[in-house]
Amino acid sequence: MPPVLTPSLILDSTYQSRDDMLVPTAEMLALPEKVMQFGTGGFLRAFADYFIDEANRNGVFNGRVVMVGSTGSKRTQMLNEQGGLYTVRVQGLKEGQIIEEHRVIGSVSRALSAKDDWDEVVELAKSPELEIIISNTTEMGVVYDPEDAYTNGAPRSYPGKLTAVLFERATHFSFSGESGLVILPCELITDNGAALKSLVMRLADAWELGTSFSDWVESNVHFCNTLVDRIVPGIPDKSTREDLYNTLGYTDAMLTNAEVYNLWPIEGKKEALERITFAKANPGVVLTDDVRPYKERKVRILNGAHTSSVPMAFLAGEETVLDMMQNPKTAEFVHHVMLDNIVPSLDVPEGIEFAEEVLDRFKNPFLRHKLIDITWQSTSKWRLRLLPSIHSYYTKHNTLPVHICAGFAAYLIFMRGTHEEDGVVYGTWNEEAYPIRDDQAGFYLSAWKDVDLDDKQSIQSLVNAVSAHEPFWGKALLIPGFSDLVTSFCWQMMTEGIEKTLDDLHS
């Protein structure tokens, strides 16, 4: 077995001179700690820390990251055993060409446990070199915990930990303006920076930290709203890892896969954005005064295309997104959904270019994203990701987006529950059972129960009832012709099959 990845190993001339991988230099590994990062998971390692590593290579940030985990996890231990080093394996398509790169990330100096190393976290908070705090604690991490407290040791919640860190810094520097920080949350919630700031201010009030602290936060701590976009599948399987270790010449317990594409729009005031100097090294980091168009573009084009195409591809017998894109009929359907229905419904920057990049991402031969996993909570996804496109397309063009409507019909058929086992509703298609993991599975199990599958009018009644079901959609689907068109697609799929429906759609 090859040796473990460590700074002393990677600084050997054998690795420094290799041209098949990128490795950090001794100068990069000696840079000061400028970033505190709450979260040690694969996404941040292949996203924020990747960007900072790239900036350090180009001499435009010149700082490293201290990761903070909630507990003394095995991951924290492994990071420290490797001196903060780990490999990101970038794989995918760019403009139709296969890209594969191995990069040893040198932007992380060490990992701390908030539970066991809180004193060190506080010392870092007091460092004059600290500039930025990054987090990715999942959406459930950005919540108010009324039982949280800051007495001895770390508070329980992430907002509590952040409030404590900011309070220690503010008091240490006597609330000076120069000691302010930039906060970059990566949690997938709307206006994540504003949401996190409101929690910090609420905790400051509940903990009676004083007006001097609240004023300091208000004036000197910049909470930026952000959007993150990169697929990070994580650690390769065991056999792949072993082959990679032999190729790389070392073992790496933290080796992480990532796709080629990356995008990180960051919204903030000018004085905050000017301090995010690592953005200069990668065009994927976009500094803006409004992150909403980028979010709308991602949610509507990428996520919307996923949600509307997956039921059709699943019913066509495909298993993964790659399978969907390798089947000419379903691939053409995805193309039409994205470029003929969704993009024309939007007013966002570079919509066509983004859609073409998404098509490349869907065709990534290194990713095996199962369609059945993407169907999780499809009902809420349709409401958030596709109803705005249906509505705006109709408003702009006075006609319906035909392919999205066909996708909605496929969604209704996919949601046709046939039986329930151990609390899980199952559907059946082509005599194969599959789980329907959706909060509304029970509603559809009941709604389809009395439908006569041999009677088009009976199916029409179901479609009418679903379209008018305001708890799901409001009144968004009460568009002239929508129910009739969806019914026609449902009827054809159930009587003539998916393949014939796709052929007629594209003829």
Image (cartoon, rainbow, N blue to C red):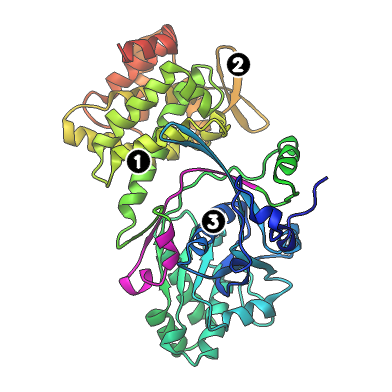
Q: For mark 3, what is the residue?
A: 50
Q: Residue at x 47, y 84 (%)?
A: 179
Secondary-structure class at tag 3: helix
**Would you call the spot at circle 3 few (<14 residues within 10 Å), some (14-19), or many (20 or more)?**
many
Tell me which segment is drawn in magenta: 256-281
Q: In front: 299, or 425?
A: 299
- For residue 308, above or below residue 470: above
Q: Earlier in the sequence, mark 2 or mark 1?
A: 1
Q: Amino acid at mark 3?
A: Tyr
Secondary-structure class at tag 1: helix
Q: Nearer the viewer, mark 3 or mark 1?
A: 3
Q: For mark 2, what is the residue?
A: 432
Q: In front: 492, or 258?
A: 258
Secondary-structure class at tag 2: strand
Q: Position of residue 506 (x, y in %)?
A: 32, 15
Q: For mark 1, what is the residue?
A: 354
Q: Earlier in the sequence, mark 2 or mark 3?
A: 3
Asked if residue 101 can be seen in this view, the reply is yes
